Each structure stands twice: as structure tokens, then as C-alpha cells.
Image (cartoon, rainbow, N blue to C red):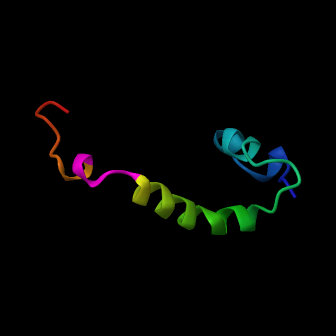
């Protein structure tokens, strides 16, 4: 169930709108760590080992 606009601060409206209608928000939140882990594992290690250049 998506909260009503009077149930959250206006700042969060964009985040609330990104939740697909009819979705289970708790299930979506529970999936995020696994999705992030899979994304990070798919990245090559070389760029992660590099130091930022000066001014970055």
C-alpha cells in the first residue's frame, strides 16, 4: 500500500513515486542487498583498486 501524501514529508515524494503500484515494498527492500551484491560482483576489480586522481 502506498502512503498518502500527508503521511510523509514532501521531500520524499519522488522516492515514494518510484515504488511500483501494487508492489510489496518490504519484498523490494529485502531484494536490494542481493541485487547490490550481484552488481558489485559483476564489476571488474581493476577500477576498484585505482586511487582517485587529484582534484577528483
**The quadrant where residue 34 appears:** bottom right
Q: Residue at x 25, y 51 (%)?
A: 48
Give residue 12's position: percent from left, percent from top. 66, 44
Question: Which quadrant of the figure has residue 11?
Answer: top right
Residue 40: % across, % down? 42, 57
For residue 6, side relative to residue 13 (left or right)? right
Image quadrant holding the N terminus, namely: bottom right
Residue 4 painted magenta: no
- State which region is magenta: 43-47
Give the camera-side residue of 16 and 9: 16
- 28 left or right, relative to 40: right
**What residue occupies the far top of the structure in this picture?**
55
Residue 47 drawn at (x, y percent): 25, 46
Q: Identify which residue is drawn at 64% across, 65% down.
A: 31
**Residue depicted at 83% across the width and 57% down the height:** 23
Does residue 11 sit above or below 34 in this rendering? above
Amino acid at each position: 500500500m502506498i502512503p498518502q501524501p500527508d503521511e510523509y514529508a514532501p521531500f520524499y515524494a519522488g522516492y515514494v513515486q518510484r515504488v511500483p503500484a501494487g508492489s510489496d515494498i518490504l519484498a523490494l527492500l529485502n531484494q536490494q542487498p542481493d541485487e547490490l551484491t550481484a552488481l558489485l560482483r559483476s564489476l571488474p576489480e581493476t577500477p576498484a583498486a585505482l586511487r582517485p586522481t587529484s582534484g577528483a
